[in-house]
Image: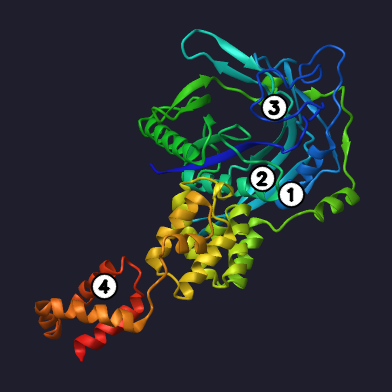
Amino acid sequence: MEFETVIGLEIHAQMKTDSKIFCGCTTSFGSPPNTNTCPVCLGLPGSLPVLNKRVVEFAIKMGLATNSTINATNQFARKNYFYPDLPKGYQTSQFDRPIIEHGYVDIEVDGEHKRIGITRMHMEEDAGKLIHDDYEPFSYVDLNRTGTPLLEIVSEPDLRSPRQASAYLKKIHAILRYLDICDGNMQEGSFRCDANISLRPFGRDELGTRTELKNMNSFRNVQAALEYEERRQRDILLEGGSITQQTLLWNPDTEKTEPMRGKEDAHDYRYFPCPDLIPVEIGDSWIAQVRKTLPELPDQRKSRFLREFDLPEYDAAILTESRELADYFETAVKRYAQPKKVSNWMMTELLRELKGGSISECRVAPEQLGELLDMIEQGTISGKIAKAVFGDMLESGLDPGIIVKKKDLLQVSDESELLAIVREIIAENPAQVTDYRNGKTKLLGYFVGQLMQRTKGKANPGLANQLFNKELTG
């Protein structure tokens, strides 16, 4: 029997606000434990929440960017459960009246375009953090994160493979980053994902029993966890077994899922409207005001790169994955107006050196990259030397012109100077000359290599080829 995989994602994105959702405490990461707290986020008796308007604006932005409906009236609710890092014994969230509903984003996997529905987005507060001792049977509670504003983004069960899930996750991540409403740092927990996955026989409409995956802090882990769970469920079903609905943790060390807790549904949380917060009313004028602040989004920018810079589809997709990378490309093109060559260098030399890091950490400014490519174009340095210079630029941050001058790397393009060396090499290699003239023309590379060795790589390779061709065939 063949099975169809059905996946839905729940994404928690921390909003990039200076203060928490219901109080004035800072949201800064890395402070000493339990220092960014107050009576409101600690849930002390008599304290009352006040909604951070910026959080609502950020939610509206995300709604507009994902083709969603923004509800004119939405309401906060209390989600009741006990956990050591939840000081109030409930989480202030939204339930039946969320701020955003019925949106979508488009993804592409293996050349196939697919539209993924977004069921809802709602505002809520984050919980604290448990820190488990590696050596003693103790756990410590840090409540600094408590009350940090979250936007939970719930997809429709439209994803049919782990790769589609990864593509969708990256698209949502990119939109949040382009909007500048979430820093997207998965290692610090500001962008987190839970995944629901089930299998059903092909052709059947009814969903299978799902499991929920947690503890996935990278795009790679999300895809790996879903692939493992997909295989695990398929093996059970093929053997005639049944899937148990449960929450699973992903262990990246063993690359396996591990049970966390049993079945869990909305009624377990005893939702009810929050008595301390009035419904949020959002008028058309507020939405129009926020719409004016929207930047060019990833899909729009990709289309413009294809149209304006005549880039291949693959290049445009890579360069627009992040706003910072796209900005870098456009600035470099202003300095060196050959977009494809800029793209080639960015996607080979630059991204390889970054090793998955952020472009903002790169010591080579886009203007400097443009200058380096211009030096190749002008014949000041060769492509080979340019790669060495680029390595120095990454370490020092110096302009390429300074490095070339300091290390005496200017390309030798003086024909008379190179011709003298060419004739010396020909005179010293009579056997190779005879073989070349007898049809072994691949030996041209040998001769040019000898020239490069003597000039320490500084000879103009195009001119070198011309001179050897002329002298060997003359």
Seen from the viewer's position, the closer of residues 236 and 228 is 228
Q: Secondary structure at mark 4?
A: helix
According to the picture, the residue beneath numbered tag 4 turns out to be 451
The outermost residue toward the bottom is: 474
- Three-letter amino acid code of the residue under disc 1: Ser
Q: Is residue 243 left or right of residue 24?
A: left
Among the two numbered marks 3 and 4 on one chain, the one whose residue lies closer to the N terminus: 3
Determine the CA span between mark 1 and mark 4. 64 Å
The outermost residue toward the top is: 137
Among the two numbered marks 2 and 1 on one chain, the one whose residue lies closer to the N terminus: 1
Q: What mark, if any, has residue 126 been given in the picture?
A: 3
Residue in the picture at 54% in, 50% down: 362
Q: Secondary structure at mark 2?
A: strand
Seen from the viewer's position, the closer of residues 264 and 195 is 195
Dividing the picture into quadrants, the one containing residue 34 is: top right
Determine the CA span between mark 3 and mark 1. 23 Å
Residue 47 location in percent, x, y?
Answer: 86, 17
Which quarter of the image is occupied by the N terminus? top left
Are there few (<14), some (14-19), or many (20+) residues within 10 Å of tag 1? many
